[in-house]
Amino acid sequence: MDFDTPINRIGTHCVKWDMMEKLYGVPAEGGLAMWVADMEFRPPAIVQQAVERMAAHGVYGYFGDDRAYLEAIRWWMKNRHGWDVAAGDIFTTHGLVNGTGLCLEAFTAPGDGVVLTTPVYHAFARTIKAAGREVRECPLSLIDGRYEMDFAAWDGLMTGRERMFILCSPHNPGGRVWTAEELRGVADFCKRHDLILVSDEIHHDLVFPGQRHLPMPLAAPEIMDRLVMMTATTKTFNIAGSHTGNVIIADPALRAKFAAKIMALGISGNSFGMHMATAAYSPDGAEWVDALMAYLEGNRQVFDAGMAGIPGLRSMLLEATYLAWLDFSGTGMAPAEFIGRVEKEARIATNHGDAFGTGGETFLRFNIAAPRAMVVEAVERMQAAFRDLQ
Ligand SMILES: Cc1ncc(COP(=O)(O)O)c(C=O)c1O
């Protein structure tokens, strides 16, 4: 397991490096790509071998016989998360943005409201708006440098037109691992306002040592009749290009609606993604994730210590995810000023905080899942770009 050796991705048609000049004006040569949430690492050898076996065979037909695939998912959820999943509850989608879109189509109608706890993963709002539904922002409270939920305030924001709540657990950005009490609070909120709860747990394996993620079905088993779970191998094992995710639904009525949508849209598994996921959800995969998190812990420390040295900047302490969330509000600078310094002086491409909704405006999101040397380089560039503050 080598996380240190840099891998040149320029010219491979990857969005993170090959689109960054077009989108940010930061040239890939000489720039640092720290936006999109994929990692600068190869997946575990066992995943690579699965792809090599497919390539060596050379016939790329339709996938069938999903017993090993479903068993691998069940094994992973039981062993890593203590969660029993029934094989018959598992749907395979083309990733979880696709899963989100399918949930919107299956469980809401045009004009319905969908609750998001902002700032939150930007594709949720994009998908909701594109589907002709309305985003209902419920802002997270920033208390002592970490995000918390304020159910009493959120009660007052409901209009009666809301049908769905999309939870990001663990949270992107900000890296919160929600507590059992917070998750039960979400479940109660959904009951109170009669909402379907879609729990996107794509980051559930990327939890730092000392933290424990709790799957929603374990936190609030009483809401299984309104719960839709979303999980994937893609973020955990850095195989997002395989576009494969799982939507897991225990309630028969919700499952039937979702199945009808999958059928209507002709969605079936991508054979590369299915083979890669089957390989990844294994003891070898588990060992790799443990090593990955130990490495990312080092990156997190380097990044946070470096940012702490720049007056006015504050990096939120991540409990999960490799997405550092850096607050520039203490600098008193307008977004154009700090973004300009990061992109033009430091030559780093990051995700702009305003895309994540209310509360994100003074932040930039830095992806720190890269060889340590790149994180060190980013810190040095940031210190140089904000030298006048030190
Ligand atoms: C919370 C969350 N959901 C979904 C996705 C993307 O999922 P997919 O690549 O499976 O569409 C991301 C990517 O960063 C994410 O952070």
Image (cartoon, rainbow, N blue to C red):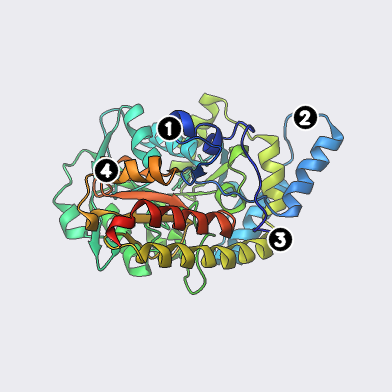
Amino acid under label 1? Answer: Gly
- Tell me the distance, in whole angstroms, between the alpha carbons under discs 2 and 1: 38 Å
Q: Secondary structure at mark 1?
A: loop
> Looking at the image, which is closer to me, 165 or 324?
324
Q: Residue at x 50, y 67 (%)?
A: 208
Dividing the image into 4 quarters, which one contains the N terminus?
A: bottom right
- Tell me the distance, in whole angstroms, between the alpha carbons under discs 4 and 3: 40 Å
Q: Nearer the viewer, mark 2 or mark 4?
A: 4
Q: Which mark is residue 25?
A: 1
Residue topped by disc 3: 1
Q: Are marks 4 and 3 in contact (CB under 8 Å)?
A: no
Residue 97 shows in this picture = yes
Q: Are marks 3 and 1 in contact (CB under 8 Å)?
A: no
Q: Nearer the viewer, mark 4 or mark 3?
A: 4
Q: Nearer the viewer, mark 3 or mark 2?
A: 3
Q: Earlier in the sequence, mark 3 or mark 2?
A: 3
Left or right relative to 251: residue 138: left
> Looking at the image, which is closer to me, 283 or 180?
283
Q: Earlier in the sequence, mark 4 or mark 3?
A: 3
* Residue 50 location (% of width, % of height): 77, 45
